[in-house]
Each structure stands twice: as C-alpha cells, then as structure tokens.
C-alpha cells in the first residue's frame, strides 16, 4: 500500500470553485482500480493550501490513475485556479 500526498495552492477567493472540482476529482478517484481511501485537508495557517491524502493498493495503481485521461481532464480544469503547480509526494509505510 502507498499513500499519495497532493499539495495544492489555490488562488484567493477560489475556495468554493476548488471544492466543486475537488468533489469531482474524489468521485473519479474512488472508481480508480486500487483506490483504498482519500481525505482532503486544508492548512490551519493558510486556508488556500489544500492537501489530499490518497491510499492506493500499489504504486502501479497510482501511476495508472495519474496517467489516466479522466484524471488529466479534471486536473486541467483545476489548474486554472492554482497559483502553483500541484506537488505530489509518494509515501510508504515501514522501512
């Protein structure tokens, strides 16, 4: 199992727009092969920084989802309200 941490910095005043896109993204991700769970968080200091934690069965499942046309389509809509490109970090449990 892997955990994927996605960090997004959204433009000020775009929280409701982001939330709509994030819901669409989560709905699409849930149907991805290997999806286990997902969680959306925001920074306490800066509400415009959003973090998504996704658990997938394998790195291969994540790589396939990352390259999918469905994800690229939703992310392309989202990119217009980001002030920085999203940052993706892959994490594993144990040593």
Image (spheres, helix red, strand yellow):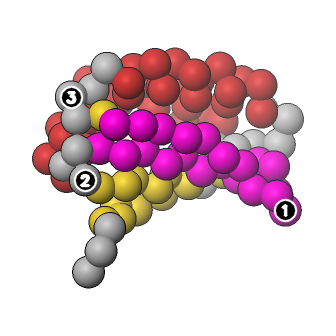
Q: Which residue in the protein does label 2 denote? A: 1
Q: Residues within 10 Å of mark 1 (few under 14, many from 20)?
A: few
| Mark-to-mark CA distance, 2 and 3 | 13 Å
Residue 44 sits above or below residue 70 on the image: below
Most extreme residue toward the bottom, as rendered? 95
Q: Which residue is mark 3?
A: 33
The secondary element bearing badge 1 is classed as loop
Q: Secondary structure at mark 3?
A: loop
Viewer-proximal residue, 18 or 34? Answer: 34
Residue 63 seen in this snapshot:
no
Q: In front here: 8 or 92?
A: 92
User: Mark 1 or 3, which is nearer the eye?
Assistant: 3
Does the rendering let one see residue 14?
yes
Q: CA distance from mark 1 to mark 3?
A: 34 Å
Give the number of the mark in front: 1 or 2: 2
Figure quadrant of residue 65:
top left
Query: On the picture, is 49 further left or further right than 91?
Result: right
Q: Main secondary structure of the magenta part?
A: strand
Q: Residue at x 19, y 49 (%)?
A: 58
Task: Tell me which numbered mark, 1 or 2, is placed earlier along the sequence.
Answer: 2
Closer to the camera, 31 or 88? 31
Callout 3 crowding tier (Cα within 10 Å): few <14, some 14–19, many ≥20: some
* Coordinates of residue 41 in the picture (x, y in percent): 66, 46
Query: Sequence-wise, which precedes: disc 1 or disc 3?
Result: 3
Mark nearer the N terminus (2 vs 3): 2
Residue labelled with disc 1:
45
Give the residue drawn at x 68%, y 27%. Answer: 19
Q: Nearer the viewer, mark 2 or mark 3?
A: 2
- Whole-percent x, y for residue 2 in the image: 29, 55
- Magenta part of the protein: which range? 36-56
Instruction: Tell whether position 92 is magenta.
Output: no
Q: Residue at x 83, y 42 (%)?
A: 12
């Amino acid at each position: 199992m892997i955990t994927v941490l996605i960090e997004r910095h959204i433009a000020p005043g775009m929280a409701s727009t982001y939330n709509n896109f994030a819901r669409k993204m989560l709905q699409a991700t849930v149907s991805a092969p290997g999806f286990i769970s997902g969680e959306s968080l925001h920074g306490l200091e800066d509400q415009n920084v959003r973090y998504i934690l996704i658990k997938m069965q394998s790195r291969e499942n994540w790589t396939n989802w990352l390259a999918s046309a469905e994800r690229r389509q939703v992310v392309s809509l989202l990119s217009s309200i980001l002030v920085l490109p999203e940052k993706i970090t892959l994490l594993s449990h144990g040593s």
